Image: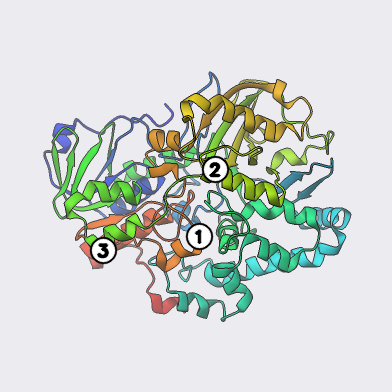
């Protein structure tokens, strides 16, 4: 029932024993952590405040007959080690790569399609931006080279275990100035200007550096956001490829729930936690105490700090408070009577099988960001759109279509309030896409808009920040919060930890492995590789 799993047993019964570990939050990382802990023989209880599991990676039905992935849309950064170890493929996970790549229409009626297929990509580049064929491949080669250095498909993957230091990262990439620029220094505009000359190709790619980020493509460090979203290993043959989950993104969380439950973890939903007491467990909203040796918190770091209260180490609390955690994105779901028909390619269909970006000019990026900082809406939004029904028609009624729209910039504190202006945001999002289409507005039958306060309320993410905190270089790697906290027996296992945000699962795995190793070093079935093995 779309993540409504209830409770393994009455709360009084669950509170009547001492657990080895309690996991706070049944998002995908919390469920991942629970599965690893239970597989290691630990007694584990997962407590979720909402009635539905999955956190931001779940399913809803806001319109009759539609299975909607309201926050997480595509899967690209999920760690293959987690999928393999927890048996997600044999459990029924079906992942379809978005072979259409990236389609971008332009205001002059032209467009570009950056296919995943190399031959089609080269043909497109030769037709649209012939002077940039070599430069585009050089830029892609840099991203691939850094991915191979940092994320080889073995235990040396720096996403596994605690973060490496900046010096260790520099060693890994051979102190290559271009690699270091990509990881720590360049803006997205600098990255593109370094390799590309064609203004349209540059315009098409600017948004890839600011996904979920409170910054413009011209701000230092935004190239690292592009890299973060381009280094996935879910498809071993094509690093960086994203794809659709058949049945919707919540299927990932539901299968992780099954893995945890099969291993012996108990899960209870609709059970808010009021306090975390290190080395003793948690206190529920109703005053019930559940005792546990270890607590792993999948909720975002600000929620974790609140739950710990006076138990929180002062230095750690200050570190948490310093993480920017105000969202700038709106999640818009559109139920359509017909798929989008782009005026640039009215008879093509490849643009519907990948990501679709509606671009902004340089001044629109700057003006839109400035407007959001003032609490206002921009004149036009950057959107990244996914026609979920292009690959999975089962999630909508026959003949209908479902378009997931990721858009920014919008303010958390919208002047006049989100409730009063939600319809205005919907119209703006529809217009931002419709200006490139024929009859798009008339095809929209239902709309759901989730602004940052809605995401905060519905999902529990402080500030509505989809990554539990910024993913710019100042808040990544060894500057991101560690899974281990200074409070004995307390770990963070959510996206606010290394290696960052998105549906990855590895954050939960990392925390669980550390907790398992600390509780019983000899019992750890899959030890985290030591730093010395990563050099």
State the separation of the CA atoms marked 1 and 3.
22 Å
Image spot of residue 236 (x, y percent): 59, 59
> How busy is the neighbourhood of tag 2: few (under 14 within 10 Å), some, or many (20 plus)?
many
State the separation of the CA atoms marked 2 and 3.
31 Å
Choose the circle earlier in sequence order: 1 or 3. 3
Query: Could you say which quadrant of the image residue 288 lies in?
Result: top left
Q: Nearer the viewer, residue 387 or 45?
A: 387
Read off the residue under disc 3: 315
Residue appearing at x 79%, y 56% in the figure: 199
**Horizontal arrangement in the rendering, residue 84 relative to residue 104 (left or right):** left
> How busy is the neighbourhood of tag 3: few (under 14 within 10 Å), some, or many (20 plus)?
few
**Horizontal arrangement in the rendering, residue 173 relative to residue 319 (left or right):** right
Read off the residue under disc 2: 372
Instruction: Classify 222 as above or below 181.
Output: above
Instruction: Classify 189 as above or below 171.
Output: above
Looking at the figure, which quarter contains the N terminus? top left
Answer whether residue 95 is visible to the viewer in this image: no
Which callout, 2 or 3, points to the residue nearer the camera? 2
Choose the circle earlier in sequence order: 2 or 3. 3
Image spot of residue 165 (x, y percent): 42, 74
Read off the residue under disc 1: 472
Give the number of the disc on residue 274: none
């Amino acid at each position: 029932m779309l993540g409504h799993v209830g409770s393994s047993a009455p709360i009084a019964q669950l509170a009547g024993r001492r657990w080895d570990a309690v996991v706070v939050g049944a998002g995908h990382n919390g469920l991942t952590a629970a599965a690893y802990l239970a597989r290691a023989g630990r007694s584990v209880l997962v407590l979720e405040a909402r009635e539905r599991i999955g956190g931001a990676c779940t399913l809803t039905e806001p319109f009759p007959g539609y299975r909607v992935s309201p926050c997480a849309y595509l899967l690209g950064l999920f760690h293959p080690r987690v999928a393999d170890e927890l048996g997600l493929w044999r459990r029924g996970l079906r992942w379809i790569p978005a072979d259409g790549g990236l389609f971008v229409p332009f205001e002059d009626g032209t467009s570009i399609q950056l296919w995943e297929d190399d031959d089609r990509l080269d043909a497109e580049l030769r037709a649209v931006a012939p002077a940039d064929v070599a430069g585009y491949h050089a830029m892609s080669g840099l991203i691939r080279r850094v991915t191979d250095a940092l994320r080889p498909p073995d235990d040396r993957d720096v996403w596994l275990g605690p973060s490496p230091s900046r010096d260790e990262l520099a060693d890994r990439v051979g102190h290559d100035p271009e690699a270091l620029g990509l990881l720590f220094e360049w803006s997205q505009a600098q990255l593109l200007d370094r390799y590309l000359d064609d203004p349209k190709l540059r315009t098409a790619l600017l948004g890839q550096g600011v996904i979920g980020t409170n910054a413009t493509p011209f701000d230092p460090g935004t190239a690292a956001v592009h890299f973060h979203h381009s280094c996935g290993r879910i498809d071993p043959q094509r690093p960086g490829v994203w794809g659709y989950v058949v049945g919707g993104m919540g299927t990932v969380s539901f299968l992780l729930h099954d893995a945890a439950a099969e291993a012996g973890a108990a899960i209870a939903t609709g059970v808010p936690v009021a306090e975390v007491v290190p080395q003793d467990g948690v206190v529920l909203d109703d005053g019930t105490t559940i005792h546990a040796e270890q607590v792993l918190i999948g909720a975002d770091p600000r929620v974790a700090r609140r739950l710990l209260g006076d138990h929180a180490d002062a230095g750690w609390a200050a570190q948490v408070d310093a993480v920017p955690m105000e969202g700038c994105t709106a999640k818009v779901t559109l139920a359509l009577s017909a798929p989008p028909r782009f005026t640039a390619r009215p008879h093509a269909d490849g643009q519907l099988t990948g990501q679709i970006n509606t671009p902004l000019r340089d001044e629109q990026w700057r003006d839109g960001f400035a407007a959001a900082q003032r609490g206002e809406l921009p004149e036009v939004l950057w959107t990244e759109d996914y026609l979920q029904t292009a690959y999975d028609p089962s999630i909508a009624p026959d003949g209908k279509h479902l378009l997931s729209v990721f858009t920014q910039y919008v303010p958390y504190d919208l002047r006049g309030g989100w409730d009063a202006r939600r319809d205005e945001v919907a119209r703006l999002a529809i217009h931002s896409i419709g200006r490139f289409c024929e009859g798009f507005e008339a095809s929209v039958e239902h709309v759901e808009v989730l602004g940052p306060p809605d995401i905060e309320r519905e999902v529990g993410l402080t500030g509505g920040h989809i990554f539990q905190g910024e993913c710019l270089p100042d808040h990544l790697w060894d500057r991101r919060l560690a899974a281990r906290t200074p409070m004995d027996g307390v770990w963070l296992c959510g996206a606010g930890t290394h290696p960052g945000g998105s549906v990855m699962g590895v954050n939960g795995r990392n925390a669980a492995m550390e907790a398992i190793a600390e509780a019983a070093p000899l019992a750890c079935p899959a030890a985290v590789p030591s730093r010395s093995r990563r050099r």
